[in-house]
Amino acid sequence: MNSFLAIIWNPDTELCHLLGLPIRYYSLMWVIGLVAAYLIVKKVYKDRGIKMEVYEPLFVYCFIGILAGARLGHCIFYEPDYYLSSGKHFIEMLLPIRFMAKGGIQMVGYSGLASHGGTIGIIIAMVLYCRKYKVKVLECIDMVCVATPLTAACIRLGNLMNSEIVGKATGTDWGFVFVQNGEDFARHPAQLYEAIAYIIIFIVTLLIYRKHKEKIGSGFYFGFCIATIFTFRFFIEFCKEVQVDFEEGMAFDMGQLLSIPFIIAGIWLILHSRKKQH
């Protein structure tokens, strides 16, 4: 293998230990993504003249919504046969534990998270938040979607540090060699492709927002966010390795099938937002 073309990818998944607990890069990237989104959306709220005491609870709602939605989405969409097969497995779906075959419980963390489920979860959370704090639903979601692509990019960089959700073999010397997975051949760094795309989407969204703040509340930013993110997600899946066995032989994998409704909804929201502004 040509070492000048291949990137030997073998990072330590842990940054450090704090009070005896490992601080993983994946968790750190989640925190960075969420904190960045918090600060950006806070600025958008200020631009709208919304009181900060109304804004502060939004972070809690979004955090719970995205985590619960992403976890349940993975279990239901990708591994329903396992997690819905028994009461113990159902508990594993809700808690970061694994029941051992010989008895006992092991803390394993939430190893399976699905972006489509996280999207559904955060939308539900924002609807509940809006009902309680009397904020218009589309206005709230539009504001959050200004920052969402940046958070999505951070999460994919976390996946890269974990050497997970890898791409297919490139068939050449070019690519990433994921040593932690016991491999010696190059794959497409699909996680990096997604992260770069989401950063570009975030920059474009921010530029649009600076010139068209009046679009907040029309559904435009919501539509633009999910249409662009899931359109790219649909095409990048072609160079990703299958995530679960049942995807083998499918024309479109589960990630692509789940992306289609979001793409359609996003395009509809963009078109509908133009009607609302006229």
Image (cartoon, rainbow, N blue to C red):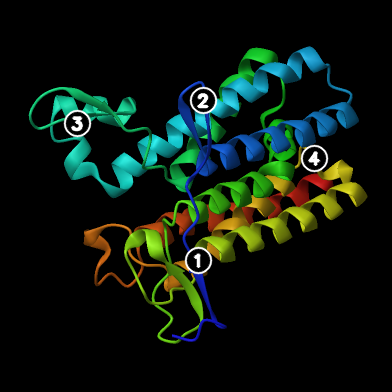
What's the mark number on residue 222?
none
Nearer the observer, 78 or 4: 4
Q: CA distance from mark 4 to mark 2?
A: 24 Å
Q: CA distance from mark 4 to mark 1?
A: 32 Å
Q: Is residue 54 among what the camera can see?
A: yes
Of marks 4 and 1, which one's residue comes earlier in the chain? Answer: 1
Say if mark 4 contacts mark 1, CB within 8 Å: no
Q: Which residue is mark 1?
A: 190
Specify whether 173 is left or right of 227.
Answer: left
Of marks 4 and 2, which one's residue comes earlier in the chain? Answer: 2
Nearer the observer, 102 or 245: 102
Looking at the rendered structure, the kind of residue marked 4 is Ile
Q: Which residue is mark 3?
A: 89
Answer few, some or many: residues within 10 Å of disc 2's Cα (few below 14, many 20 plus, some between 14 and 19): some
Of marks 4 and 3, which one's residue comes earlier in the chain? Answer: 3
Specify whether 231 is left or right of 142.
Answer: left
Against 155, residue 253 (above or below) is below
Q: CA distance from mark 3 to mark 2?
A: 21 Å
Residue at the far left: name it. 102
Q: Secondary structure at mark 2?
A: helix
Residue 193, percent from left and from top: 58, 66
Rendering quarter of residue 52? top right
Rendering quarter of residue 93? top left
Residue at point 65%, 24% (across, down): 59
Q: Which residue is mark 2?
A: 64
Residue at point 70%, 37% (across, down): 37
Nearer the observer, 91 or 162: 162
Residue 168, percent from left and from top: 39, 73
Against 258, residue 101 (above or below) is above
Q: Secondary structure at mark 4?
A: loop
Q: Which residue is mark 4?
A: 216
